[in-house]
Image (cartoon, grey):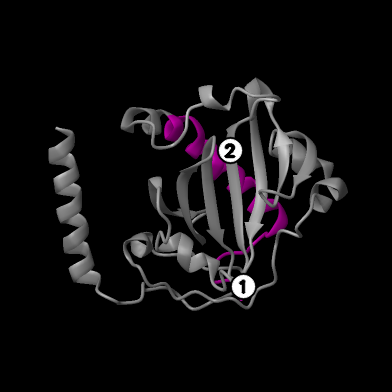
Amino acid sequence: MRNRWTTTAALAAAALALLSGCAVAPAPAPGKPAPRLPADSVAYDELPVITTRPKLFPGDCSQFDRDPQLTQRLQGRSPRFNSFVKACVLLRSAGTQVEIGSTDPDRRLPQPWIGYWKAYSYGLYHFRRILVLDRYYAVSQLDQNGCLVAVNIGAAQVVTVRVGAQPPVTGGYENMPRPGDSVEQDRRMANAFCPDAVRAAETYLNEVDPGGGSLAS
């Protein structure tokens, strides 16, 4: 059954690629507030993206220091910046955490959003193109110990939101599930963390970018 589903999905993707070709996804003109995006945008490799908006994530935890309610709305506590993952980490109950961060352009990766949307990476698991709040292009995928949502905010910066298990204090990494261990394990991880990661992204964007979106002017 799994092979049949995989074959069917591959054929459907191939047919969709032939239909869409290199066409750019249809979309309304940029506006303020940001317009709603067509649901079929996720079927296109090319998007009418803009990069003129300012970055949202400041590269530290100052947003949470200034607004403790933001931490509460994300159901977290004790925000601390992790320079390795370039994210502000908020601990949650039941051994989970939410990380708010970003991928910013640099010499090695001048256009990070394209890499996310077109899946320019090896070892992607449970990759999905989605719309967040109907106004932001985004992708979700399993990443490290949870699920990552990468959001196009109409800027060169890509906002990232990850929800997953807290890493062990000392050792024990070998006993934690990892993406790619098995199809069933990936499905369980996605069900456990991806819906929550999308909700966390919605909460963060509603707070720091009201009326914003990928095509906000």
Q: Is 136 placed above or below 145 here?
A: below
Front in this rendered view, residue 15 or 38: 15
Q: Quadrant of the N terminus?
A: top left
Residue that protrudes farthest toward the right in the picture? 66
Q: Going by the image, does 155 lie left or right of 5?
A: right
**Disc count in the image?**
2
Q: Which quadrant is the C terminus positioned in? A: bottom right
Magenta: main secondary structure: helix
- Residue type highlighted by circle 2: Val
Residue assigned mark 2: 163
Answer left or right for 88 relative to 123. right
Marks 2 and 1: in contact by CB < 8 Å?
Answer: no
Q: Amino acid at mark 1?
A: Lys
Q: Is residue 118 magenta?
A: no
The residue at the point 20 percent across, 49 percent down is: 9
Question: Of helix, strand and loop, which one carries label 1?
Answer: loop
* Residue 40 in the image: above or below residue 29: above
Above or below — where is 153 with respect to 182? below
In x, y percent, where is residue 159? 61, 57
Q: Position of residue 82 (x, y in %)?
A: 74, 45
- Tell me the magenta residue range: 189-217
Viewer-proximal residue among 200 and 133: 200
Q: Give the alpha-carbon distance from disc 1 to disc 2, as whole Å.
A: 30 Å
Picture coordinates of residue 56, whole percent (x, y) = 70, 62
Q: In the displayed structure, does residue 143 sit left or right of residue 128?
A: right
Residue at the disc numbered 1: 32
Residue in the picture at 53% in, 46% down: 148
Residue 173's disc is: none
Q: Position of residue 215 (x, y in %)?
A: 54, 71
